[in-house]
Image (spheres, grey):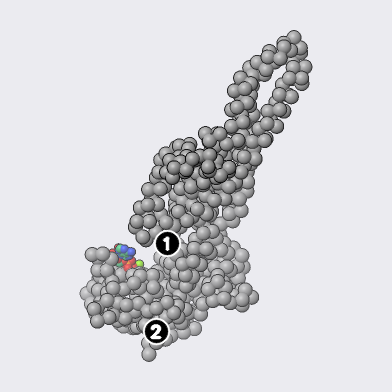
Amino acid sequence: MSLLEMSNIKKSFKQLEVLKDISLHVNEGEVVSIIGPSGSGKSTLLRCATTLETVDSGDIRYLEDYLCRTNSGGRAVYADKAVQRRIKECFGLVFQNFNLFPHYSVKKNITAALTLVHKKSKAEANAKAAELLEKMGLADKAGAYPCQLSGGQQQRVSIARALALNPKILFFDEPTSALDPELTGEILKVIQSLAKEKMTMVIVTHEMLFARDVSDRVIFMDDGYIIEEGPPKEVIDNPQSERTKTFLNRILE
Amino acid sequence: MGLYPVFLSLVSATGLAGATWWEKLVTVFLPELWRIVKLLLGGLSGTGMIFALTLLFSIPLGILVMFCRRSRFAPLRVLTTFYISVMRGTPLMLQLVVFYYAPYYFFKIMMNKMPENWLFLALIVGFSINYAAYFAEIFRSGLSSIAVGQYEAANVLDFGRMRTFLHIILPQMVKNVLPSVTNEMITLVKDTSLAFTLSYVEMFTLARQESALMVSPMPLFVAGIFYYVANLVVAFVMARVEKKFDYYHV
Ligand SMILES: Nc1ncnc2c1ncn2[C@@H]1O[C@H](COP(=O)(O)OP(=O)(O)O)[C@@H](O)[C@H]1O
Ligand SMILES: [Mg+2]
């Protein structure tokens, strides 16, 4: 069974139809990249999967739990609190602009959810933070505040914050778009190393070379639809749809 | 120097016109000054009480009002907005008088039937609900300047509404509003003098009475110095508090 399955997702903001009929699934250990022009609904899709937006209709399932299911009237009905809690423990989300808690130190950013929400002991949480910071190459920054870090360092902290809760699947929404070009490399490296560890990831990105490298599957979205989907060798190197070709030509030139 | 004519008028009133300036200073001016200082110090407790109690009640009340102002329940939102606009749009002095006489005008209770400390109660209630309106608006703007990303990050980490507010939003809001709260506190120190409209005995009431009695602005000057020094203290303390929140910026 796939880890995440979204079927026939529709989502509008007032008159504007943003997701028109999206179905996708993500298997355990898979890295899926979502590419597409801006405004095509990529962020909205991730935000629906991570409960930041609610869908109008369609089903979203994480393992055995349904976040929402379409009723006979065609409207999505959301699960109760307990199920939603279980689902939220299942995923992590890394934002484009980090959204670190500015009043917390790097360490506290990572441990806050563990101690406050999951009631882990301070010692346990601190050990987890130390381990993750080591992994992110930020061992010396535990006591620093986000405002004292570079964008790349902040994004690594935010990845550590998401990893602290041991998610089964990690979503990234353009994790390098807010960074200076010379800082994108350090983030891509981190994601690459997570992929080697078989972390399940869904990555919205404009870094085509990176997407080709790291992904098992690439999804091209345009205007609220999935236009093309498959291994990177097919979608990026040998696209079938005209829209995919146009998009890739524009971005790769 | 504004005090010098005052000094002269004091001296001429006591028939010491022939004495040297330092004799006048020591025998007339300083004792008078000391008497006024002691008199006004007697009113300082009234001033301090209004200040402290108003802060104590209006800040939590302001948070409550802010939540009502942002409520999803439209009637509550409209009512709160109206309350805030009335509190901010009419003189505090007028509000105090209305509060004080409210039992009589609205409930036909004779003023002499009211409990003895009604005057003080009316003052504190009046000040508190007036300042709560201002604080509510300050808190609201302090809240709205927090990026939605903070709520979203907390949401994804499953903080829940209450934990998100207490741990993530409130601390940042406090930092945001400190400068405005300092301003409000400084205004409050000065506004305590409005208690004179209800003849409540605080510093300014005493200074006015004494000034009229002496036919001299001297007590008013001294009161002015008291207010000024009190506000220096407020500004100093709040600057220290703001410094405590300096360890990060957004
Ligand atoms: N909260 C919102 N309210 C109204 N319109 C929105 C909202 N969020 C996104 N949109 C609109 O939905 C469309 C898709 O946005 P988005 O999902 O951010 O696209 P992408 O991430 O692919 O660039 C855009 O036209 C955007 O303006
Ligand atoms: Mg986007």
Question: As displayed, is residue B138 above or below residue A210?
Answer: above
Image side of residue A227 versus residue B111, left or right: left
For label 2, the crowd category at 10 Å Cα-Cα, with few meaning under 14, some 14 to 19 and many 20 or more, is some
Q: Tell me residue A54's x, y (percent).
A: 34, 72
Question: As displayed, is residue A61 above or below residue B74?
Answer: below
Please tell me the numbered disc located at residue B148: 1
The chain carrying label 2 is A
Q: Which residue is mark 2?
A: A65
Based on the displayed image, in which of its 4 quarters is residue B29 positioned? top right
Tag 1: amino acid:
Val
Q: Give the quadrant of ligand 2.
A: bottom left
Q: Tell me residue A115's x, y (percent).
A: 57, 73
Q: Tell me residue A43's x, y (percent).
A: 35, 69
Image side of residue A241 versus residue B239, left or right: left
Please tell me the numbered disc located at residue B207: none
Q: Residue at x 59, y 75 (%)?
A: A125
